Each structure stands twice: as structure tokens, then as C-alpha cells.
Image (cartoon, rainbow, N blue to C red):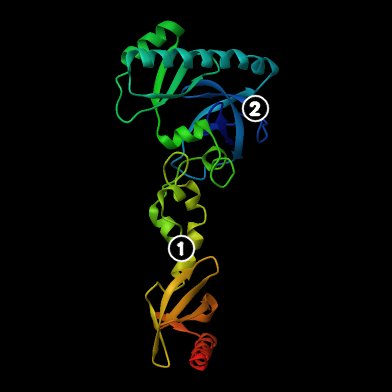
Amino acid sequence: MDITGVKLRCSQQVYYVYTNNLFVRRNSLCVVETEHGIDMGRVFKKMSSLPDESIKVNGKLLRLATQEDLSLLPQIEALEDRAFAVCKDKITEKKLDMKLVMVKSLFDKTKIIFYFVADGRIDFRELVRDLAAVFRTRIEMRQIGVRDEARMCGGYGTCGRQLCCVNLKEEFEPVSIKMAKDQNMNLHSLKISGMCGRLLCCLGYEYHIYREINESLPSPGFQFIVNNIPFVVEAIDSLKESLILKHNSNTVAIHRDEIRTQNGTFALSDKAIEKIKHSLEVVTEEV
């Protein structure tokens, strides 16, 4: 049975539902039934089977969005705006240590979800009772992390483009400081952190390429002996796929193609050795 990935309204998370024999195209607006209720979303992808067994299918497509469905959106958005204002006032009134991020009503108005961030656990039972009394529907308080907050609020990164988490990523993948180190990036926290304060998502995009290049080159500190003179690997330039060898004040740039493996270790090619010998002759002449 065909499966469709849908991004629900006011959400960047992809829900996988059964296509239900409907013909839909990418970016088509549709009404779906999920485990949480009936909602509207946009088709993100179509597939005949799930690429990962850990992904679960929860729900089905009901129909393509009709003009009547679209005409209901302003009412739902007005309800969400009112719910946000009411909830924010009650949070202030009850002095709860939480920050309201977004409010979403399901398309059939059977549930209103309040997304918030907080440092610890919040006892919001009294708040839920008050909100249920006002809106006469099910209330769900959903605590999210700072990365989810950035995704919901949106914005632009230091690169000038829209945040990766808004458009590119389906699920957040782990990003480590090692990824930044292996890419020879400035490890200042402001340089490698996103709007959410966490490590940039884009650190993982090209990491596997940098890792492959770095593994094919000797690490800084490795020594090559040429004419009984030790040349130490001073630095690695992953983008240029090269490294800098240094002896005293003499430096030589060697490309990855000029290095070979021999008996389980790195060795210089004849071309690289000639390049180093030439640099030694130049230094001798200058002296």
C-alpha cells in the first residue's frame, strides 16, 4: 500500500500516513486523519514502502483539501490567536516559569495543543482546567526543546538563508563538537551555534566527506623523513585535500595524491620528495 509523508499545518515534522488510493502530488493540500485527530497538511513525499522500519504509519489521507476546507482556516487561525492570548495571560497570572511558543488547533477543533519551553517540569494541571473551561475542548500541553522552538518560530541563520530545521530536516540528527573540529572550524561557541543556542545542524551535512578526507591524510604531528631531515605535518587543509609539512622555517604543501600508504603507514611519493628536496635547495641558496 502506498504511503505518503505529510507535513501537518503549523508543523515541520513529517507524519507518514496511508495514501488511501488517492492521487496526490507533492505540495498538495490534503486533509488527513492521524492518531491525534483530523488535521490539514501538505504532501511532502510519496513512497511505496518505508525506508526505515523504525518509522511508523499513523493514519490515512481522507481527501484533497476542498474550497470549503480552505474557507475554515481563518476561523481556526482566529481561535489559535485567541487561545495564545488567553493562555499567555493565565501563565502570567499563575506565575508559571514557562514560555509559550505556539498554539495549534486541530482541523476539526477537537483538540488545542499548546507548545511551550521550560527549564524543568511544570505543574500545569490548574492551567489546563482553566483553558478547558474557556474553550470547551480537549487541551494538550506539549513541552518542546529549544531546537523545536527555533523550527516553529523560524528565522535566518548567519549564512543568510532560512534555518535548515525549517525546510530541510525531517528529524533532528545528533551533532557533536567533533564534527566542528574535524572540519577545522572556529570552535568559538557563537561561530558554530544556531539561533537555538545548540550546534549548527549544517555541521553534519558534509561531515562524512571531511572525515573521509581526514582519514586518508596523516594527522598533525606525523613525521616524514627526507634526506634524514624530519618534516612534521603542521596542518591539514581538508577542502584543498592537502597538508602542510614543516621543518624549522621551511614549509611545503603536499596534496593527497602525493601521499601513499606503505606497510600500514603513510609515505611520500617520488613527486612529493622531489618537491621537498627542491624547497631545501631554495632555502640553502637563500642562506
Indicate the position of residue 229 as horizontal and vertical percent values: 40, 89
Residue 121 visible (yes or no): yes
Badge number at residue 22: none
For the point 41% across and 52% down, which residue is it? Answer: 188
Does 196 sit above or below residue 230? above
- Outermost residue toward the right in this view: 67
Position in image of residue 41 (x %, y %): 59, 27
Residue in the picture at 50% in, 31% down: 152
> Helix, strand, or loop for circle 1?
helix
Would residue 136 be visible to someone looking at this image?
A: no
The amino acid marked with disc number 2 is Leu
Residue type highlighted by circle 1: Arg
Q: Is residue 233 above or below residue 136?
A: below
Callout 2 secondary element = strand
Eye-nearest disc, 1 or 2: 1
Residue 68 pos. (x, y %) = 67, 14
> Gap in Å between the C-alphas at discs 1 and 2?
40 Å
Q: Which residue is mark 1?
A: 211
User: Between disc 1 and disc 2, whose residue precedes?
Assistant: 2
- Decide: few, some or many residues near mark 1? Use Cα within 10 Å; few <14, some 14-19, many ≥20: some
- Name the foreground residue: 151 vs 7: 151
Q: Which residue is mark 2?
A: 29
In front of the other: 235 or 209: 235
Residue 218 locus on image (x, y percent): 42, 74
